[in-house]
Image: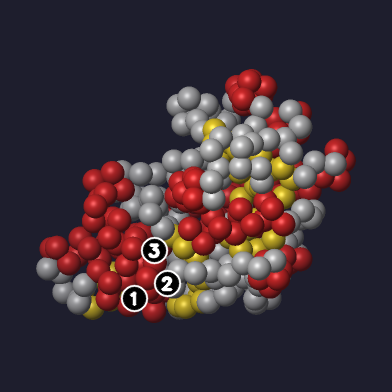
Amino acid sequence: MDRQAKIFVAGHRGMVGSALMRALRQAGHTEIIVRSSAELDLREGAAVKSFFATEKPRYVLMAAARVGGIHYNATAPYDFLYDNLVMAANVTEAARLHQVQKLLFLGSSCIYPKFAPQPIKEDSLLTAPLESTNEAYAIAKIAGIKLCTFARQQYGCDFISAMPCNLYGPEDNFALENSHVLPAMIRKMHEAKLRGDTSLVLWGTGTPLREFLHVDDLAEACLLLMDRYSEAGHINVGSGHELSIRDLAKQVATVVGFTGELKFDATRPDGTPRKMMDNSRLLQLGWKPRISLSEGIAGVYAWYLKNSETARKKG
């Protein structure tokens, strides 16, 4: 990407968007355009088109999304589907109409079937039913992928899609009603430690296997993809390492300093039993993650301690 060209980062205040901002600045990009959701509601098509007509960005990084964990996905499926579908459609269409040079749409590993063969290759998309607890979010993200693919096919747009595994990092959401598993664990264990609790109950059986990637590693992958990748469909972005939710909980407890017993409530949903991404295509482009999970969790916990008041209210 040209360092003097205008780049629109949609969702710059979120965990992914803020990581993209850090990576762009570190790479020397000076013309970064941002708008808060109050300034520009990406669900309003006319407003989005007007913004593109005025600002004329050359590149677009689409990181804006309504996100949340299993509980939030399951209890607000319409909101997840509608908001994410409309935002993807509006940004993609405005980018097409105003001839953006390149767009990157970011999705999620939840696009894949619940029982996809492991590690999950890109061609597993739409081969079997989705996991029901995040079906709405997944459908919206699949639609975003297809918008990019068909814009390339029909109009020759250089629009690409990347699907990361479970992400974590600074600026994550720690509001328990709609947070993902890792930040929820950090907050619950921190508060349990402060109370002096001798045990802590966590959702599910603890057996599902998950792959985690620090958001700064994702941001580096995104910049590399903008420079080196131009294909239809999508590309996986994964760390290449997985662990059980139980083992994740043990790592978080060690970092936080919670010494109580970890209990698991098997009456609560587990979600997909395993989600391990095949990241071989991305590795071949020259990328590899730098931040280990233990180092990353320690950094996120340090960030949470400094920003706990605002972090608990995000979402």
Q: Where is residue 186, by image quadrant?
A: bottom left
At 64% from the left and 57% from the top, the residue drawn is 224
Q: Give the spatial CA distance, label 3 vs label 1.
A: 10 Å
Disc 3 + disc 1, Cβ < 8 Å: no
Q: Position of residue 107 (x, y in %)?
A: 61, 52
At 22% from the left and 63% from the top, the residue drawn is 190
Disc 2 + disc 1, Cβ < 8 Å: yes
Disc number placed over residue 174 in the picture, else none: none
Secondary structure category for the residue under label 1: helix
Residue type for callout 2: Leu
Q: Where is residue 100, by image quadrant?
A: top right
Residue type for callout 3: Leu
Q: In the visual, does 124 lie left or right of 73?
A: right
Q: Position of residue 229 (x, y in %)?
A: 73, 56
Q: Is residue 131 visible?
A: no
- Nearer mark to the viewer, of 2 and 1: 2
| For residue 262, above or below residue 85 | below
Q: In the visual, does 235 lie left or right of 169?
A: right
Secondary structure category for the residue under label 2: helix
- Nearer mark to the viewer, of 3 and 2: 2
Secondary structure category for the residue under label 3: helix
Q: Nearer the viewer, residue 32 or 218?
A: 32
Residue that carries the numbered disc 1 in the rendered image = 251
Disc number placed over residue 182 in the picture, else none: 3
Disc number placed over residue 293 in the picture, else none: 2
Q: In the visual, does 18 lie left or right of 203?
A: right
